[in-house]
Image: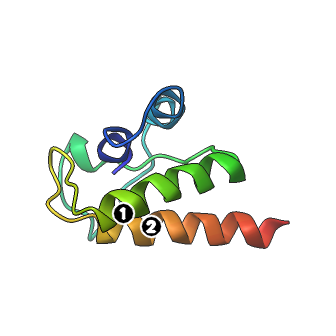
Amino acid sequence: MLVETASLLDEPLRSVVLANCQGTPLAKPADHKGGVDTDMFEVALSADEVGNVLSVVEAAARRGMRTPRSARLGGFVAAWRELKQWHDAQV
């Protein structure tokens, strides 16, 4: 999802998001299917960066945009909202 999200973003935020895809992915749960494209990474973004990503993803979803691999962005919006809520709770 990070690579797909990055396709919606402009620089420098695109590079910041893609930097989170470097390194060793997290262990996949037993019920997690898929290859390298479904690897999961710990996301190290500031609250402002997450808020900016969320704004772009929400706007893209409202416009009916797609990413190269996803026809709908509803799941992306939900995931980025969840991360924003987590950041907001840390304050």
> What residue is drawn where x is 45% and y is 52%?
56
Q: Residue furthest right?
A: 91
* Dot 2 crowding, Cα within 10 Å, few <14, some 14–19, many 20+: some
Residue 4 place in picture, x, y as percent: 29, 45
Identity, as a three-letter code, of the amino acid under mark 1 = Phe
Horizontal arrangement in the rendering, residue 86 relative to residue 89 (left or right): left
Horizontal arrangement in the rendering, residue 46 relative to residue 72 (left or right): right
> What residue is drawn where x is 45% and y is 48%?
26
Contact between labelled residues 1 and 2, with CB atoms less than 8 Å apart: yes
Q: Which is nearer the eye, 36 or 19?
A: 19
Horizontal arrangement in the rendering, residue 22 relative to residue 90 (left or right): left
User: Could you tell me how far apart the alpha carbons at marks 2 and 1 are, in whole angstroms?
Assistant: 5 Å
Choose top left, top right, bottom left or bottom right for residue 64.
bottom left
The dot on residue 4 is none
Choose top left, top right, bottom left or bottom right for residue 63.
bottom left
Identity, as a three-letter code, of the amino acid under mark 2 = Ala
Q: Secondary structure at mark 2?
A: helix
Q: Which is nearer the eye, 85 or 43?
A: 85
**Disc 1 target residue:** 76
> What residue is drawn where x is 32% and y is 70%?
75
Q: Which is nearer the eye, 82 or 26?
A: 82
The dot on residue 79 is 2
Q: Secondary structure at mark 1?
A: helix
Residue 50 place in picture, x, y as percent: 59, 53
Residue 85 lies, with reference to residue 26, above or below; the image says below
Horizontal arrangement in the rendering, residue 67 relative to residue 78 (left or right): left
Residue 7 lies, with reference to residue 79, above or below; the image says above
> What residue is drawn where x is 17% and y is 56%?
70
